[in-house]
Image (cartoon, grey):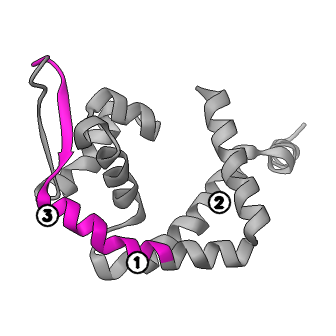
């Protein structure tokens, strides 16, 4: 077997390639729609995960798990949001070893402002894929994520 045979074998069945390619295409659409807000799709996703935490906050470890990121990568992704004043990172009141991430009031307002832009991108994706395929894709991705934990 040579390198082309190996490449063909992997390309024929590679779930990683397909998942990443599809994720990039979807992200491009959301990023374009969110551009007027100054936020990227990845940032809005992070802000959503933070906002949905107990009392509107997430411990760093839990947030890393939700986002399927290493803590170092999560920290790098949070820095621009913190610098922009959209989130704050503080120590937990109950366990000083735990860092907790919370949206600021400015971050809450920006998330609300992003919703119409997100809605437009989401509607475009659903219209492109169709309702049934969109639902099936969401369910399949959730199931795959759960199985891979």
Residue drawn 63% across the image and 73% down it: 125
The one of 34 and 126 positioned closer to us in this rendering: 126
Q: What kind of element bears circle 1?
A: helix
| Position of 63 relative to 17 (above/below) | above
Residue behind mark 2: 21
Answer whether residue 144 is magenta in the image: no
Part of the protein shown in magenta: 95-119
Please say if the residues under marks 3 and 1 sit with CB atoms less than 8 Å apart. no
Is 110 contained in the magenta span?
yes
Graded by Cα atoms within 10 Å as few (under 14), some (14 to 19) or many (20 or more), the crowding at tag 2 reads: few
Residue located 90% across and 36% down the image: 1
Res. 112 in view:
yes
Residue placed under numbered mark 3 in the picture? 106
Circle 3 — which element? Answer: helix
Q: Residues within 10 Å of mark 3 (few under 14, many from 20)?
A: few
Q: Is residue 51 left or right of residue 132?
A: left
The location of residue 22, given as percent across then percent down, is 65, 61
Q: Main secondary structure of the magenta part?
A: helix
Neighbour tally class for label 1: few under 14, some 14-19, many 20 plus, Cα within 10 Å:
few
* Marks 3 and 2 in Cβ contact (< 8 Å): no
Task: Answer with left or right where residue 18 lies relative to residue 64.
Answer: right
| Residue 18 vertical position relative to residue 3 in the rendered view, above or below | below
**Where is residue 119 shown, x and y percent of the image?**
48, 74
Q: Residue at label 1?
A: 116
Mark before the other along the chain sequence, 3 or 1: 3
State whether residue 84 appears in this view: no
Query: Looking at the image, is mark 3 or mark 2 earlier in the sequence?
Result: 2
């Amino acid at each position: 077997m040579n390198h082309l045979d190996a490449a063909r074998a992997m390309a024929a069945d590679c779930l990683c390639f397909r998942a990443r390619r599809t994720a990039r295409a979807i992200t491009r659409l959301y990023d374009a729609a969110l551009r007027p807000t100054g936020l990227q799709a990845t940032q809005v996703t992070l802000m959503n995960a933070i906002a949905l935490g107990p009392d509107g906050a997430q411990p760093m470890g839990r947030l890393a798990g939700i986002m399927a990121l290493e803590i170092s990568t999560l920290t790098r992704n949070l820095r621009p949001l913190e610098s922009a004043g959209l989130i704050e990172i503080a120590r937990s009141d109950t366990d000083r070893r735990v860092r907790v991430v919370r949206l600021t009031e400015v971050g809450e307002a920006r998330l609300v402002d992003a919703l119409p832009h997100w809605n437009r991108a989401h509607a475009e994706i659903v219209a492109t894929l169709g309702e049934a395929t969109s639902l099936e894709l969401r369910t399949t991705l959730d199931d795959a994520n759960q199985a891979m934990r």
